[in-house]
Structures are given as structure tokens and as C-alpha cells.
Image: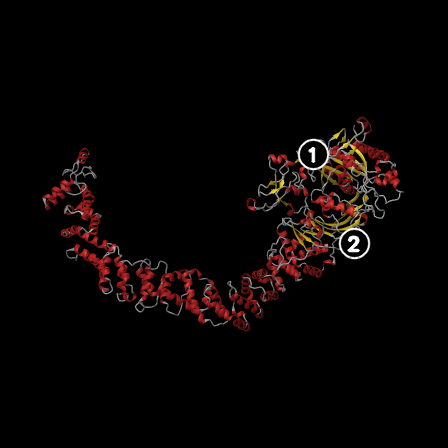
């Protein structure tokens, strides 16, 4: 049975039980009188007190019938019991927000993006989607269309800004302004195996939180539900926010260092606290939500990396499989670096709070922004490095992409202290 | 008093964090207000705006100037401007400066929120020190100057009415759709808000929430939402939530006020407000707000607009006129003159709607007397012209309002149309009447058309008395010549058919006072409107009264008597007594020319059987109308006269033969006459002891009517009583009814029926002594009769047995009465003596 997680209120429900919303369309059915809009108190409460009375009027919501077809999830359209006009619009039980078409046809996976302000979350999402559709998508034969008009609009604008105008995304508005809807994508992956046919679909929900929303435990509380519902978290760590790196980079040529924002370890600590308080499953004191710790802007760290560092090149994804050895190599290198920076406080914090984590290094742009235009992409355009690694690792853990593991299990266990922190 | 302020922008890291946050606050602002405010003051730059704007380009970015209602009833007036890059070098920063107004609080001096558009009091950066300086007011900028607004209103004229309609709907219904204004410049949205704020009632204007710019209209909660053209595409088809007015597109082509986005007609108030703005007369709004009347009614605004010479559609002219009728004191003389002049001005549109003309007529009736002649005359002329040319009824006006010059012009212009219209018989009489009045007002000679019109009018009224209405009454009052002609027509109609005229006079208050005789009409008038109850059932008295009402002697005009007869008795016939009275009172001579003598004959022939007045009337009629009577009527009257003779005892022998002879001459005889005469003969046969021979004649004649009348008479109570009380009478009837037992036919049936049904019950009711007396009386007439009686009266076997066991005895000397209905073996029970 397909389980759907509402991307707005994160209520989890079987798809077959999601109510429908009447479209209030006039047809010749049952006299042709369309339903009248009526106040939707559930939705109005979710939207908040600033919603004007006229906007509270929406199409009537009616429950899904308990028929065999609907329980199987094959009943895409249901006639409104009042006007008789069939509708395919499903709404969340908890908040009555309308779901995009096809949202309820497959399971949902929520990927939370967290990171300090100016850590590059929006840029990362934009580049990640582009890579999944391009270079990485070819390797895995996956597709990733945007779902819903709002995501399609933002998706189009993100791509246009970054790849055509070479502009980095504007600063993300805090959620308090009510601007940030989640980004919804339909991930389609071909089924693998001797007898497998067709594709497997999953809804990916990215929530691009503003840095302001993660600057403190109080601000992060707004995201508790979202974080608690996440199937995986990608924590973006801007190395230029770490004291050791800033000290070393200060003398280097390049753009000026960014202002000091909330520290990654503070965010990680607040994150773990929020998840624990929300009852997220905990194993021996550590949160079990998989955590991909992605050190961004690795192009700025070249001076700190060896010539053969795996961080200097993209993963190959040969055969459409995620190379776990390659991931571990990256993991080890990043863990080594983080252990050196700021006395390894971030590593210790993360490994004490999260049961499953892996370190990644990526660069969304592949090069620093021009010195005279720090909000622009490099003139050559984004040349991303390893932006897909954190997401693929999270998807691989859920079996959504194949993972190739060549090393003996014992050897891997001995080295994979961080890949399986508790192993 | 300083206004509560808040500043919001993306600022460098500080003690309270980094990025977007409130950077300066007036102390004491509730946290709930800040939470809500944060959702209202955000800003996203236009998609197609320069992504890395220069300082000059930044100035051209739209301003998000918003006025929002918070959940606690307080208000937030905010101005948000794009500031480009933030402290980190990333773009997308903005600065919001907002003023919080507590519930019920307004800007100082009651200033409208929109007046703060681009006020110099707004700040585009966080004040130094983190605390906003005191802000007592938001002085208005010059950007919303009247001249600029008037020019803007003119440029947006095609959309004004539709937008105002939606705003009216919002003010009246909080669930009404939000208004989305698509403009290329947020300043134009502010101008829209200024236009709306001026037009709306003051209270509604203070409640009007708005934002001059947003990229997310579906997230905006204000009533007016300003968007750029690129951001309005997603709203198509959301008619239930939004009313989108795309003022950046070419205006829609439409005659008159532009319909709304869904094609709906604009509201009257909105059209008036749009007209005022289009004419640049915005100062009228304040005056209109002070005038009485429900908010959003078209009357006050339309009246003021028309006072100022602003052209408005017909419906508004109507509304203005009606409002002025209700509130004439609200307009001073100059305004009233202006209103009337505008309303009276010639219109291009044709035909002028009836409602407008009616409203103008009403207005003229209410305020016409207070107008200067040069102001009133055009309106009066217009109304008169409308009365002539409109297919709908328009009340003609007082001619006193017309100047001589205008009157002459109208007479020359409208004369031919007036005559043609009065003569037109096709469309009823309402319009000709109206035109006749107008012709009278303009002294157009139509005297030759009055009589034909009166003829049509009389026919129409007789066919439908309800057609007589106030307008006709007024016209008859105004036009005595028409009234005289109509009364003549009705008088003539009364001679031919007084009933229909009487009905008309009963239902319609037609004034009958006239110098002319009109005797028939006056009689109808008395009948219709005379004293309740008429003559109290005395129809002879009523006839006298009707004839007196004619005010003309019936002997001079005998037809009066015929009309009076029809009025008093209608389709009925006078009773013989009433007819005798009339005949005695008027004499016979007047009935001949009046042709009323047939009424009298009919009265006699239709008289109730047994009524002595009937045969007396017949006797009189035979005496006074010998030449007029037809043979059959005469024979019938002679039958009645014969009955009179029988009653009086003056008839000679041979009754039956005489009856039969007269009857043959009068065939077919009126049944009442027949019953009357036969009954009289039968009673004489039953009562006259010497009429045995006449009975023999009856028996021999076998006349069924006579036999039946005899049986009816024999079954009367008087006969039964006499049978019980007079043994000799009993004996006579026994002998009569046993006579000629061999005769069958009608008499045979009657005889048997009378013996069994009349005589036997009487015999059984008699005591033994009475029976003995009867036997004795019969014995005197012959022993055979007594023996026959005993045999006839002897009980059957069962009867005797019953009498024996019942202790009864029928033998003479026993007093117990005989039982009724004794044994079925009575050999005489089906007849008399065999």
C-alpha cells in the first residue's frame, strides 16, 4: 500500500484514504449544477490568520470511498457525491492542502537540506537537480520531473538563473514569510534484476530551509515536523565558516571570506535535539535518521587536498551503480580533514548525535565566484563536483539506487566507523 | 503620540542572529504581531527586473506598499523596497518599514492609509542605533496629487466601474473575491487605491486593505492586490477567489460601462463613482458620503454627479431623480437647478427608458414648483414630449411650467402626432387619453376626435369596468367635452342594455352629474348606487324610485318604463300581484308604447298555481289589452279567468267541457296555468255537493290532467280532515269514488288510488261510532251503498284474528280504533267495491 507524506504538514497516510476535493465544475451530470465553494476550516487553520475570508472558500472535500478499487489505489478519479463530477485532486487529511497530480501514486521520500546561512543550500539544490537530470541521470537512467505548478516554476527559474544568467540564487527568505514551499520531484528509476521490469517511482521532497530558520533551536523548532518526517538529512557545511579554514584561507587569493554565521556544530546539535524531542527513533542515544554531512565549496580547499584526493573528481557511477568504496574514500578524507579543523569538534558532535552518517565533499560551482561578483556563478558556468553523492547515498540506503560493494564485509566494517557509526 | 514601528531586513550577524530579521522595533510590540507581520512584509523582486541592479535601477523596482489586517484586529501599514545585495553580497535583500495601528486606531488626523504612499516618513534602511525614531505621522507625498489622480482615472476609465463594483462587493461581503490589479507600475496600483479610497464610504475606505506589489498574489491576503503582468498568469480561471483586472492590456471594447472580468454588469454605484472620477469631480465623493441613503446606492452619487454636469447612463439618471424626490432638501437651489438641467438635456439615446421618464415626472411633480421657469420649462417640455412619443404611460405635466414660447414650439412639433395618436383605435384608449390631455395642455384642437374616442371608451368600459382608473378619471376631469360625450354614449347604451351600464356604474366611479337629461343613465345610476337594499323587497316601490331617478316623466318617455322594468326585475318576471299593482298605478295606456304589456301577460301566465292574483290579473289584461293579445295568450288568460269564475262561484255548468275547449285553443298551455285551472275545478268537485254531474263529465272525459288534479286535491289535508269529521262527506266521497267502476283509464287509476290511499286510512282512523254514522249516511243514499261499504271495510282473516287476540273488536259499539294496515288478505285493499 502506497504511503504518502504530506509535503506541507508531513502527515503520513495511506494514499487510498486521502480525501478528494471537488473541482466545482459544471457538467451535464446530475442536473449540471456545480458545487458551491465552502469554507475549508482545516486548510484555513493551516494557512494562518492572515488568510482572507474569500480565500477560505474552496471546493468541498469528501472522503475517499471504501471500495476495492480505491483500496488498491487504482481509483484515480472519484465522482463528487454532491455534483457527480469526477475529480482526481487529492488533499491531505491533516491540512487539506491539494497534492499535485501523481503525488499519491508512489511513496514519498523527504530529503531535508540543512545548513547555515550562505552555506549554499539553494545553489546546491539547483545544481543537484541539474546533475540528476544530466550527467548522473544518464548513468543511472533516471528521470526527475518536477511535480506541481509551483515546483515547476521554481525549477525553471533556478535553472534559468544559474545556467543561463549565471546568477547564484538570491538569498532564501525565512519560512516565517511563508514563501518556501517544498520542491517536489518524481524520481523514476528502472527496476533491476533478472525478472524486474518497468520503473520504480518515488517522490522526492526537498525542503530548502533558509539559514535564518536554522540559526537557533527556537527558529529550528518550526522545522521540527519536517525534520522528523525526513528519510534523510543532508547537512551542508561551509568550510569557510570553520575557524581553521578561515585562518588558512584569509591570505589566499579569492573572494572575501563570508560573514560568520551559525556554526555547523551548533546546527547539528540543535538538529539532534529537535529530532530527539520529536520522538524520532533513537539508538543508544543517537538519532537514527541517516545524516549526509556534505562539506561544500571544496574547490576552495584545493590547497588543503592531496593531488590524488577523490574530492577533486566526480564519482564515475559505472554501470549505474553507486560505488561504495569511492564513497568511503571520500568519507575517510573528509573525516580526516574535519578532525583537524577546529579540533574535530564537528566530527565529535555528529558522531555522538547520529547513528548513521557519512561525510561527503562537494562543490556546486566547481570554482569560486568571480571576485568582483560574489553572487554570480563562475563565467564558465557551474562545474559541479560530487554534488550527487549525498543524495545517492541516502537513496542507496533505501534501495532506490543500486550500490556496488566490492570490499570484504569484515574489512569494510573495520574501516567504516563513520559510514556505520555504530557498527 | 508616536506610531509603533518595525524594520525588517537581512542584516549582518549580530547578537540576535544574522540574515533576515527585525532590525529595529518600537518597544512593546507584541510578539504575535511580529510573527504575523513577517508574513506580510516580504519582498521578491520582479522576475524580469535587473538581477544586479544599479542604484538607479533599484529606484525603479516596484514598491510593496501594503495595508493589512492582523488577526487581532490591528492593522499594519508597511512599505517594502528592494535593496539588492545584503551584507554577504547575495542578492534578494529588501527593507521593510512598517507602522502598527492598534485595533480601531487610524493614522493621525484620520488620514487614509493610502495617503502614506511614498511618505517621507518611510525609511529605506534600518535606523542607526537599532531603535526607530519617533514617528508622529506619515505626511502624504505629492505623488497622489489630485491632478495626477484625475489623469490616472481618465487613463483607466474602461476599468473603473468594474473595479469599483468588485470593491463594493467586498465591502458588502467579506467572502467576495480579492481584486487583482495588473499594472506595470506599483505606483499605479497606489493610485488605484487612492481612487477607491476616495470613492468608497469613509469607513469602508479605512477598512480597505491592499498591497501595491507582490509576486505571489495567491499568498496575499489583502483585498486589493497589485501585480505585474508576468505574475498574473497563474490567476486565470480563479474567478471565485480573484477578480483580475488587467490594466496593462488594451482596454476591452464595450459600449457603456465595461463589464467585469466575468462579463457581469457593473454595479450602479460603481458606475456613478467611475463617472465622477472620469469627470475629475472627485470632490463630490465627500459630499456624497454625507448625504442620506444606504451606502453603495447609486442615488446620492449620481445626483451630485448630474448636478455637476457629469453624464451618466439612464439608470443613474433615474436613481438620481428618485433620490432627489425623496431628499429634495439635501440639494440647494443651485444644485437642484443643475440636476434638473442635466436631466432635461436632450439625449442621444432613444428611446429613453420608461423608468427614467417616470422618475423625471415624479421629480417634476415634487420640485417643479421650486424651480426657476427657465429651468423647469425644458424638463416639462421633455416630459410632454415623452408623454406623446413614449409607448409607456407618462403623466403629462402641469402646463404652468411651460413658457409660452416652449408651448408654441411643442404644439407645432407634436400636433400631428397628437391627432394621429388620439385617433388611433388600435392600442386601447390609455394613450389616446394621455395624448388628449397633452393636446389640451398645448391647446391643440382635437374636438372632432372626442366623440369617436368617447365611443371607443364607452365600449371598452362596458366590456371591462376595471379599465376605469385614476388616469381616466383625471382626464375626464380635465376634459369636460370628453366626459359629456362619454355620458351620452353610456346613456345610449343604457337604453339598449341597462344591465351592463349598471354594472359599470357599480364598479367604476363615473361621475354622472351633467346638465344633460341622460334619463336612462340616471336610472342605471340609481340602480347601481341607490340606497342599500333598494326598495326593501318592494319592487313596485323600486320601480317608482327608478322612474323618479330619470327625472323625466314616463308618460313623456314611455321607453323609460321598459328600461325601468329591466332594471327592477332584470330577467325575472313580476309576480301577478306586482303586475296588477303596476297596471293599476300606471294605467294600461303607457304600457302599449313602452311595450311592457307582455311583461304583464307573462306575469299572469307564470303566476303561482292557486294565486288568486293571477286569475284576477288575467281578467284585467283581457279587459285592457284585447287588441294586443295573441289568440293563444288570450285563450290561456281565459282559462285563468275561468278559474277566477270557479273561485267566485260564477261559473255556469259544464265546467269540464269549457275547460277542454279553452285548453285546446291555448295549447300548448303553460303548466302553471293548467295546474291553476285544473286545481280550481278539482276543488270545486270535492267541495261542491251539487257537482256530481260535473264529476261524471270529468270521469267520462278521461282528461289525465284533470284526474291528476282531482287526486292531488283529494289528498290535501283539508279533505282528510273533512273525511274524519263529516260522515256525510265521507259517504259522498265513497259514493263518488265507487261510481263508474267500469271506467278505466286515468279515472280508474285515480279511483283505486283514492279508495286505498285516502278513504281506507280515513275509515280505519274512524271510531266505530263514526263508522256507524258513515254507514247510516250511506244508507240514506241507498242500502246498496251501505252494504258495499261494510264489505269494503270488513277486515281479512288475519286482521280479524289479530283483533281478537289484541282485544279489539270492530263491531259497532266498541270504541277502540281499528288497527292500521290489517291483514294482507283484505279482498278490497286494492280497490273499491267489486
Q: Is B818 above or below relative to B680?
A: above
Figure quadrant of the C terminus of chain B: top left
User: Which chain does tag 2 point to?
Assistant: B
Viewer-side residue, B162 vs A134: A134
Viewer-side residue, A269 vs B327: A269
Q: Which residue is mark 1?
A: A197
* Percent of width and height locating residue A178: 72, 44
Q: In the figure, is residue B760 to the left or right of A204?
A: left
Label 1: element kind: loop
Q: Judge whether residue B23 can be spotted in this image.
A: no
* Percent of width and height locating residue A54: 64, 48
Residue B310, image quadrant: bottom right
10 Å neighbourhood of mark 2: few (<14), some, or many (≥20)? few
User: Which chain does tag 1 point to?
Assistant: A
Q: In the figure, is residue B422 to the left or right of B237?
A: left
Q: In the figure, is residue B505 to the left or right of B728?
A: right
Q: In the figure, is residue A304 to the left or right of A88?
A: right
Q: What residue occupies the far front of the structure in this picture?
A: A194
- Please determine if labels 1 and 2 lie on a single subunit: no
**Which color scheme is applied?**
secondary structure
Q: Is A377 above or below relative to B619?
A: above
Label 2: element kind: helix
Residue B636, image quadrant: bottom left
Q: How far apart are labels 1 and 2 at the CA level? A: 56 Å
Tag of residue A333: none
Viewer-side label of 1, 2: 1
10 Å neighbourhood of mark 1: few (<14), some, or many (≥20)? few
Q: What residue occupies the far right of the structure in this picture?
A: A251
Tag of residue B57: 2
Viewer-side residue, A109 vs B810: A109
Amino acid at each position: 500500500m502506497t504511503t504518502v507524506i504530506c509535503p506541507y504538514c508531513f502527515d503520513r497516510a495511506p494514499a487510498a484514504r486521502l480525501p478528494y476535493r471537488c473541482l466545482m465544475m459544471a457538467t451535464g451530470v446530475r442536473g449540471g449544477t456545480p458545487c458551491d465553494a465552502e469554507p475549508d476550516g482545516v486548510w484555513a487553520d493551516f494557512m494562518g490568520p492572515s488568510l482572507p475570508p474569500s480565500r477560505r472558500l474552496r471546493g468541498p472535500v469528501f472522503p475517499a470511498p471504501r471500495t476495492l478499487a480505491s483500496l488498491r489505489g487504482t481509483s484515480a478519479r472519484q465522482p463528487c457525491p454532491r455534483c457527480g463530477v469526477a475529480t482526481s485532486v487529492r488533499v491531505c487529511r491533516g491540512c487539506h492542502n491539494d497534492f499535485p497530480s501523481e503525488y499519491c501514486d508512489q511513496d514519498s521520500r523527504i530529503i531535508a537540506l540543512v545548513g547555515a546561512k550562505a552555506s549554499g543550500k539553494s545553489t546546491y539544490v539547483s545544481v543537484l537537480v541539474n546533475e540528476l537530470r544530466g550527467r548522473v541521470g544518464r548513468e543511472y537512467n533516471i528521470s526527475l520531473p518536477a511535480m506541481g505548478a509551483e515546483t515547476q516554476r521554481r525549477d525553471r527559474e533556478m535553472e534559468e538563473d544559474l545556467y543561463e544568467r549565471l546568477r547564484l540564487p538570491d538569498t532564501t527568505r525565512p519560512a516565517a514569510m511563508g514563501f518556501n514551499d517544498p520542491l517536489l520531484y518524481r524520481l523514476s528509476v528502472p527496476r533491476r534484476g533478472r525478472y524486474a521490469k518497468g520503473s520504480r517511482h518515488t517522490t522526492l521532497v526537498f525542503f530548502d530551509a533558509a539559514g535564518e530558520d536554522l540559526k537557533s533551536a527556537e527558529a529550528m523548532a518550526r522545522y521540527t515536523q519536517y525534520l522528523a518526517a525526513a528519510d534523510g538529512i543532508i547537512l551542508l557545511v561551509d568550510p569557510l565558516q570553520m575557524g581553521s579554514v578561515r585562518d588558512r584561507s584569509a591570505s589566499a587569493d579569492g573572494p572575501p571570506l563570508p560573514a560568520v554565521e551559525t556554526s555547523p556544530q551548533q546546527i547539528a546539535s540543535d538538529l539532534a535535539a529537535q529530532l530527539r524531542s520529536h520522538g524520532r527513533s533513537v539508538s543508544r542515544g543517537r538519532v537514527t535518521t541517516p545524516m549526509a554531512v556534505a562539506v561544500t565549496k571544496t574547490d576552495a580547499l584545493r590547497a588543503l587536498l592531496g593531488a590524488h584526493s577523490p574530492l577533486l573528481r566526480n564519482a564515475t557511477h559505472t554501470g549505474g551503480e553507486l560505488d561504495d568504496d569511492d564513497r568511503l574514500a571520500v568519507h575517510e578524507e573528509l573525516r580526516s580533514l574535519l578532525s583537524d579543523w577546529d579540533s574535530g569538534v564537528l566530527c565529535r558532535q555528529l558522531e555522538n548525535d547520529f547513528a548513521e552518517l557519512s561525510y561527503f565533499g562537494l562543490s556546486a560551482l566547481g570554482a569560486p565566484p568571480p571576485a568582483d561578483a560574489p553572487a554570480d556563478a563562475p563565467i564558465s558556468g557551474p562545474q559541479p563536483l560530487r554534488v550527487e553523492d549525498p543524495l545517492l547515498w541516502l537513496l542507496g540506503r533505501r534501495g532506490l539506487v543500486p550500490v556496488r560493494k566490492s570490499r570484504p564485509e569484515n574489512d569494510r566494517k573495520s574501516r567504516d566507523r563513520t559510514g556505520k557509526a555504530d557498527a | 503620540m508616536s506610531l509603533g514601528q518595525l524594520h525588517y531586513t537581512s542584516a549582518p550577524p549580530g547578537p540576535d542572529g544574522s540574515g533576515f530579521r527585525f532590525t529595529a522595533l518600537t518597544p512593546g510590540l507584541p510578539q504575535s504581531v511580529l510573527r504575523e507581520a513577517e508574513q506580510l512584509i516580504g519582498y521578491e523582486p520582479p522576475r524580469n527586473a535587473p538581477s544586479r541592479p544599479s542604484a538607479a535601477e533599484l529606484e525603479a523596482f516596484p514598491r510593496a506598499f501594503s495595508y493589512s489586517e492582523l488577526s487581532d484586529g490591528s492593522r499594519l501599514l508597511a512599505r517594502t523596497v528592494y535593496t539588492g545585495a545584503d551584507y554577504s553580497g547575495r542578492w534578494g535583500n529588501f527593507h521593510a518599514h512598517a507602522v502598527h495601528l492598534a485595533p480601531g486606531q487610524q493614522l493621525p488626523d484620520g488620514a487614509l492609509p493610502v495617503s502614506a504612499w511614498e511618505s517621507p516618513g518611510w525609511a529605506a534602511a534600518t535606523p542607526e542605533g537599532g531603535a526607530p525614531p519617533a514617528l508622529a505621522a506619515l505626511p502624504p507625498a505629492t505623488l497622489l496629487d489630485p491632478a495626477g489622480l484625475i489623469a490616472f482615472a481618465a487613463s483607466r476609465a474602461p476599468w473603473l466601474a468594474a473595479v469599483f463594483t468588485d470593491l463594493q462587493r467586498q465591502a458588502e461581503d467579506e467572502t467576495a473575491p480579492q481584486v487583482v490589479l495588473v499594472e506595470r507600475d506599483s505606483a499605479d496600483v497606489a493610485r488605484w487605491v487612492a481612487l477607491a479610497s476616495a470613492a468608497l464610504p469613509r469607513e469602508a475606505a479605512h477598512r480597505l486593505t491592499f498591497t501595491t506589489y507582490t509576486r505571489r498574489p495567491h499568498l496575499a491576503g489583502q483585498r486589493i492586490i497589485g501585480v505585474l503582468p508576468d505574475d498574473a498568469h497563474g490567476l486565470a480561471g480563479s474567478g471565485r477567489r480573484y477578480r483580475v483586472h488587467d490594466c496593462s492590456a488594451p482596454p476591452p471594447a464595450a459600449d457603456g460601462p465595461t463589464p467585469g472580468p466575468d462579463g457581469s454588469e457593473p454595479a450602479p454605484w460603481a458606475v456613478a463613482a467611475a463617472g465622477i472620477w472620469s469627470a475629475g469631480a472627485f470632490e463630490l465623493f465627500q459630499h456624497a458620503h454625507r448625504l442620506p441613503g444606504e451606502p453603495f446606492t447609486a442615488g446620492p452619487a449620481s445626483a451630485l454627479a448630474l448636478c455637476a454636469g457629469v453624464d451618466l447612463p439612464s439608470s443613474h439618471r433615474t436613481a438620481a431623480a428618485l433620490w432627489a424626490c425623496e431628499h429634495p432638501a439635501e440639494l440647494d437651489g443651485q444644485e437642484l437647478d443643475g440636476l434638473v438641467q442635466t436631466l432635461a438635456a436632450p439625449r442621444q439615446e432613444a428611446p429613453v427608458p420608461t423608468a427614467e421618464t417616470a422618475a423625471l415626472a415624479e421629480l417634476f411633480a415634487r420640485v417643479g414648483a421650486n424651480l426657476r421657469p427657465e429651468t423647469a420649462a425644458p424638463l416639462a417640455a421633455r416630459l410632454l414630449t415623452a408623454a406623446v412619443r413614449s409607448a409607456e404611460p407618462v403623466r403629462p405635466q402641469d402646463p404652468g411650467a411651460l413658457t409660452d414660447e416652449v408651448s408654441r414650439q411643442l404644439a407645432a412639433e407634436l400636433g400631428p402626432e397628437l391627432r394621429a395618436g388620439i385617433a388611433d383605435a388600435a392600442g386601447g384608449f390609455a394613450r389616446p387619453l394621455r395624448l388628449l390631455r397633452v393636446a389640451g395642455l398645448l391647446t391643440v384642437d382635437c374636438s372632432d376626435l372626442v366623440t369617436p374616442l368617447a365611443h371607443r371608451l364607452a365600449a371598452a368600459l362596458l366590456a371591462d369596468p376595471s379599465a376605469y382608473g385614476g388616469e381616466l378619471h383625471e382626464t375626464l376631469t380635465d376634459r369636460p367635452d370628453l366626459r359629456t360625450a362619454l355620458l351620452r354614449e353610456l346613456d345610449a347604451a343604457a337604453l339598449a342594455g341597462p344591465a351592463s351600464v349598471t354594472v359599470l356604474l357599480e364598479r367604476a366611479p363615473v361621475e354622472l352629474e351633467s346638465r344633460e337629461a341622460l334619463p336612462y343613465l340616471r336610472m342605471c345610476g340609481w340602480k347601481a348606487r341607490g340606497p342599500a337594499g333598494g326598495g326593501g323587497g318592494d319592487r313596485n316601490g323600486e320601480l317608482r324610485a327608478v322612474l323618479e331617478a330619470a327625472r323625466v316623466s314616463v308618460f313623456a318617455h314611455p321607453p323609460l318604463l321598459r328600461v325601468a322594468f329591466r332594471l327592477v326585475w332584470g330577467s325575472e318576471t313580476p309576480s301577478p300581484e306586482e303586475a296588477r299593482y303596476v297596471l293599476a298605478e300606471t294605467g294600461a295606456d303607457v304600457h302599449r308604447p313602452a311595450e311592457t304589456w307582455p311583461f304583464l301577460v307573462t306575469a299572469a301566465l307564470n303566476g303561482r298555481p292557486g294565486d288568486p292574483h293571477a286569475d284576477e290579473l288575467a281578467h284585467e289584461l283581457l279587459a285592457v289589452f284585447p287588441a294586443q293579445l295573441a289568440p293563444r295568450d288570450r285563450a290561456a288568460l281565459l282559462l285563468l279567468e275561468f278559474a277566477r269564475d270557479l273561485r267566485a262561484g260564477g261559473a255556469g255548468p259544464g265546467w269540464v267541457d269549457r275547460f277542454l275547449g279553452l285548453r285546446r285553443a291555448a295549447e300548448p298551455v303553460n303548466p302553471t296555468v293548467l295546474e291553476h285551472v285544473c286545481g280550481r275545478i278539482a276543488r270545486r268537485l270535492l267541495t261542491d255537493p251539487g257537482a256530481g254531474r260535473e264529476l261524471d263529465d270529468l270521469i267520462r272525459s278521461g282528461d289525465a290532467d284533470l284526474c291528476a288534479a282531482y287526486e292531488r286535491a283529494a289528498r290535501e289535508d283539508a279533505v282528510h280532515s273533512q273525511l274524519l269529521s263529516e260522515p256525510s262527506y265521507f259517504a259522498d266521497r265513497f259514493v263518488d269514488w265507487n261510481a263508474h267502476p267500469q271506467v278505466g283509464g286515468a279515472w280508474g287509476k285515480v279511483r283505486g288510488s283514492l279508495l286505498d290511499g285516502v278513504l281506507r286510512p280515513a275509515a280505519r282512523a274512524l271510531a266505530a261510532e263514526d263508522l256507524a254514522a258513515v254507514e247510516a249516511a250511506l244508507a240514506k243514499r241507498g242500502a246498496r251503498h251501505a252494504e258495499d261499504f261494510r264489505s269494503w271495510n270488513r277486515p281479512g282473516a288475519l286482521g280479524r284474528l289479530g283483533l281478537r287476540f289484541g282485544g279489539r273488536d270492530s263491531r259497532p259499539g266498541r270504541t277502540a280504533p281499528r288497527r292500521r294496515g290489517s291483514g294482507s288478505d283484505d279482498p278490497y285493499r286494492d280497490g273499491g267495491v267489486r
